[in-house]
Image: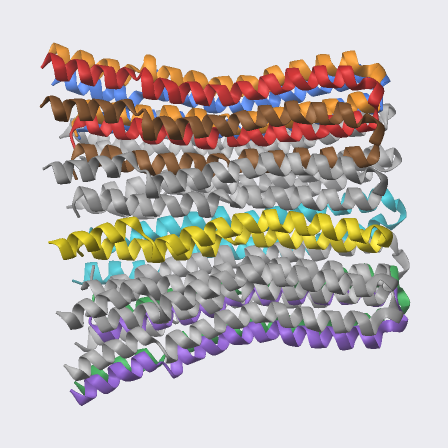
Chain colours: A orange, B red, C brown, E yellow, H blue, I purple, K green, N cyan
Amino acid sequence: MDSMTWIAVTSIVIAGITTGFGTMGPALAEGRAVATALTSIAQQPDASPTITRTLFVGLAMIESTAIYCFVVSMILIFANPFWNHAIAQATGN
Amino acid sequence: MDSMTWIAVTSIVIAGITTGFGTMGPALAEGRAVATALTSIAQQPDASPTITRTLFVGLAMIESTAIYCFVVSMILIFANPFWNHAIAQATGN
Amino acid sequence: MDSMTWIAVTSIVIAGITTGFGTMGPALAEGRAVATALTSIAQQPDASPTITRTLFVGLAMIESTAIYCFVVSMILIFANPFWNHAIAQATGN
Amino acid sequence: MDSMTWIAVTSIVIAGITTGFGTMGPALAEGRAVATALTSIAQQPDASPTITRTLFVGLAMIESTAIYCFVVSMILIFANPFWNHAIAQATGN
Amino acid sequence: MDSMTWIAVTSIVIAGITTGFGTMGPALAEGRAVATALTSIAQQPDASPTITRTLFVGLAMIESTAIYCFVVSMILIFANPFWNHAIAQATGN
Amino acid sequence: MDSMTWIAVTSIVIAGITTGFGTMGPALAEGRAVATALTSIAQQPDASPTITRTLFVGLAMIESTAIYCFVVSMILIFANPFWNHAIAQATGN
Amino acid sequence: MDSMTWIAVTSIVIAGITTGFGTMGPALAEGRAVATALTSIAQQPDASPTITRTLFVGLAMIESTAIYCFVVSMILIFANPFWNHAIAQATGN
Amino acid sequence: MDSMTWIAVTSIVIAGITTGFGTMGPALAEGRAVATALTSIAQQPDASPTITRTLFVGLAMIESTAIYCFVVSMILIFANPFWNHAIAQATGN
Amino acid sequence: MDSMTWIAVTSIVIAGITTGFGTMGPALAEGRAVATALTSIAQQPDASPTITRTLFVGLAMIESTAIYCFVVSMILIFANPFWNHAIAQATGN
Amino acid sequence: MDSMTWIAVTSIVIAGITTGFGTMGPALAEGRAVATALTSIAQQPDASPTITRTLFVGLAMIESTAIYCFVVSMILIFANPFWNHAIAQATGN
Amino acid sequence: MDSMTWIAVTSIVIAGITTGFGTMGPALAEGRAVATALTSIAQQPDASPTITRTLFVGLAMIESTAIYCFVVSMILIFANPFWNHAIAQATGN
Amino acid sequence: MDSMTWIAVTSIVIAGITTGFGTMGPALAEGRAVATALTSIAQQPDASPTITRTLFVGLAMIESTAIYCFVVSMILIFANPFWNHAIAQATGN
Amino acid sequence: MDSMTWIAVTSIVIAGITTGFGTMGPALAEGRAVATALTSIAQQPDASPTITRTLFVGLAMIESTAIYCFVVSMILIFANPFWNHAIAQATGN
Amino acid sequence: MDSMTWIAVTSIVIAGITTGFGTMGPALAEGRAVATALTSIAQQPDASPTITRTLFVGLAMIESTAIYCFVVSMILIFANPFWNHAIAQATGN
């Protein structure tokens, strides 16, 4: 395996793992937040606007951690500086 | 194993693992959200429209993390830039 | 082991693992949703139509993550682009 | 080990693992669903027809994930396209 | 190790693991179902016929997943197509 | 290591592991079932005949999964078709 | 390492592991059963004969799974057919 | 693999893992904080300003640990001193 | 490493592991049983003779699984048939 | 791989892991502390100044452990004595 | 590494592991037993003689499993038959 | 890799791991202590001086274990006797 | 690596692991015992002499298992018979 | 790698691991003890002197296990008999 293949292979592996595992935490956390929102609404229907507003702010912050992972994956697949350097070096050679 | 085979093999492996494990979290989270929705409806049947509406918004956000994983898998199988580069290099050679 | 065998072997391995492990999460989540539906019906028999309707929508969304896994497995076994490319290359040679 | 043996061996391994581990989730989920059905019946004997009906629908959906695993195992043992290709190639040679 | 030995060895390994681990889930699930049945009978002795009937249906469905594992083990030991092919090839040679 | 030794060694390993780990699930499940039976009797002494009858049926079904494991172990030690084939081949040679 | 040593070594390893790990499940299960028996007696002293009788039947069934493991260990150490075959072959040679 | 490839590969791997796993803890912690905020609002709607204010301060501190991970990933991809040294050495050579 | 050393080394390893890990389950189980006995006595001091009697029977049965492990360890260290055979062979040679 | 590459590679790996995993504990701990603060405010709104003050002191101490990890990562990337020694040795050579 | 070193090394390793891990279970079990004894005394101060007596008997039995581990460690370090045999063979040679 | 590189590499690895993992326990413990302090203040506002005083003493003791880890890391990076010996030997050579 | 180095290295490794992991169980157990003692005193201040006495006896027994581990570590570092034998052999040679 | 390097490397590794992991248990245990002390004071403010006294005795005993680990680390780094012997041998040579 030459250098470019190594970089390609590890980029593929890590892009998949980062998204695959990194979304596990946010998914579970969002599930928990949604679940408590529902019980809270059932318990106090009058406070549902405050609850849903707080819920959406919270979901946005939790989703942000999932998006960090997705961004890293996309950078590794489509804007990988090490890969670009390797291609530049290969064509420049 | 030459370079193309390595890239093909790791793409297959990671496509499967990303979807296989990455959907575990969302599935459990959705199960939890649905379960609480049901208990909430049973506890407060009058609030069922608010509850189901909040539930569907929440499920959509949780499902989004599962879709990130599925998208990464599909990119790795059908729109893999490293594979395309390798094919281009092989045919151009 | 030549290239084709490597691709065949990893396709088999990942097809099995993706389905075998990827259905674990949805199964547990569905079990949880069904279980809560039953307790909710027992607790509030009058709301059973709303409960079963919400349950089926929820089960459909959870099942969708299991189906992502099954779809990836089937793609890897029966519509694998890397395998098709390898066969094309082998016969074209 | 030649190519055919590799394919045979991995098919055997993955067929076993997919069924052996993939049925763990559904079994636990069904156990949970059945358990809650029983407590629900004990708590609200009058609702037992609704409960058992919902239980059977739910068990069917959970069982479906176990059946995905079993189907993948059977495909790998008895209708494996990679194995068929290998045999065709071996006899055609 | 020649091809036949590899196939024999992996068949033995997977037959044991599939049964050994695949029965763990069903056993725990059945234990849970039986346990809840007993508490339900103690709580509502009048509903014991409905409870035991639902219990037996549920145990049958859970046991079915254990039987999938046992069937795969038996197929791998006594009706293994890869082994049969290997023997046919060895004797036909 | 020749072929026969490989088969003997893996048979020994898998026979032990299948029984050693496969009985863990049933043991825990039986412990749970017995424990609940005892609390149920303490809670509702009048229903003890129904409880013990249901308990014994349940224990029998749980024990069956332990027996699958033991049967596979015994088959691998005393009625192993791969071993028999290897001996036949060795003596027939 | 010759064949006999391999068989001896794996027999020793598996005999120990089967007993060492296989007794873990039964021990925990018996601990649970005994613990519940004690709380049940404390809760309902009049039902102590029924409770202790059910307890002993249950302990016997749980102990049986521990004994399967011990039996397999003893077979592997003192009545190992593969070892006997190897000795027979060695002396008969 | 030469030195530069090793550095590139490990930078890719660690950038992915640090973000992928390092966001798991913060995501779960934020989910927990949001969930408790919602139950607290439902329980004491009058205190919702204090609660949301404390929640946002807490989320900011938890998010800070996720941002440490993201910062380390970005440093490793775009401002890696070891990579810069290697490039400098390569071009200077 | 010659054969005798292999047998000695694995005997030492397995003797330690069997006792070291095999006593973990019984210890935890006994701790649980003793703990419940104490709460039961505190809850129902009049039933303390029955409780302690049942406790001692139960501890004896749990201890038996720890003793199986200790017996296997002692057999492997002091009455190991494979070792005896190896010594006999070495001296008889 | 020469010495400098080894040091660079391990510094990258450990810098990522230390931050990635080391922030997991603090994140979860802060989530727990914030969550309890919210329930405490909801339960006793009058004590909210004391609660938020104690919360911030506690968060500061927990955050300190996350900062230890971040500091170690930064030292390894930007002020690594082993790397400096290696560079000094390389240039001095 | 010659035979004696192998035996010495594995004896050291296993002696440490057996004690290090084997005392984990008893320690936790004793902690549990002592904890329950304290709550029981607080709940029923009059029964403290019976409780402490039962506690000490129980602690003795749990401690016995820790002592099995310690005994095996001491045997492996100071009365190891395999080591004695190796020394005898070395000096007798 | 020569000796100095080995020592440098392992020092880097262990310095990171000791801090990264060793602060996990203290962080969680402090989170727990702070959380209980908050609930205690909410429950008994009059005792808040005693509670905060005890909390700070406790946090100090828990933090001490995190500081042991940090100290070991710093010793390994900046005052490593093995590294100093290696440098002395290298320069003295 | 010669024999003495192997023995030294494994002695170091095992001495650390035995103490490092072996004190985990006792620490947790003592934490539990102390925690329950405190709740018991809070619940029944009059019984505090009996409680603290029983607590100290229990802590002594739990600490004894931690001391077994520490003793084994000290024996391996300062009174290791295998090391002494190796030194004797080396100097006597 | 020569002998001295091996001993240095393993000493570094084990010193870090022993402290890094060995302080995890005590930290969690102290967190638990402090947490219960706080709830106990909140529940029974009058008993706070007894509680804090018992707490400090308990913390001291738990801290002792953390100190065993720290002592072993320090011995391995600064008073390692195997390292001293190796240096003596190296200089004496």
Q: Looking at the picture, how far across and down is residue E66, in whole percent? A: 52, 51
Q: Looking at the picture, how far across and down is residue B53, in whole percent? A: 71, 14
Q: Looking at the picture, how far across and down is residue B46, in whole percent? A: 84, 19
**Residue N79 vertical placement versus N35 (above, below):** below
Q: On the image, which quarter does residue N34 sit in?
A: top right
Q: On the image, which quarter does residue C80 sit in?
A: top left
The answer to whether one can see residue B92 in this image is yes
The answer to whether one can see residue A58 in this image is no
Q: Looking at the picture, how far across and down is residue C72, in whole percent? A: 40, 27
Q: Nearer the viewer, residue B77 or H32?
A: B77
Image quarter of the N terminus of chain K: bottom left
- Seen at 36% across and 49% down, the residue is N12
Q: Is residue K21 left or right of residue B50?
A: left
Image quarter of the C terminus of chain K: bottom left
Q: Is residue N41 left or right of residue N75?
A: right
For the image shown, how many numbered marks are present on the structure? 0
Q: Nearer the viewer, residue N7 or B71?
A: B71
Q: On the image, which quarter does residue B82 sit in?
A: top left
- Seen at 27% across and 49% down, the residue is E82
- Seen at 24% across and 24% down, the residue is C84
- Seen at 38% across and 19% down, the residue is B74
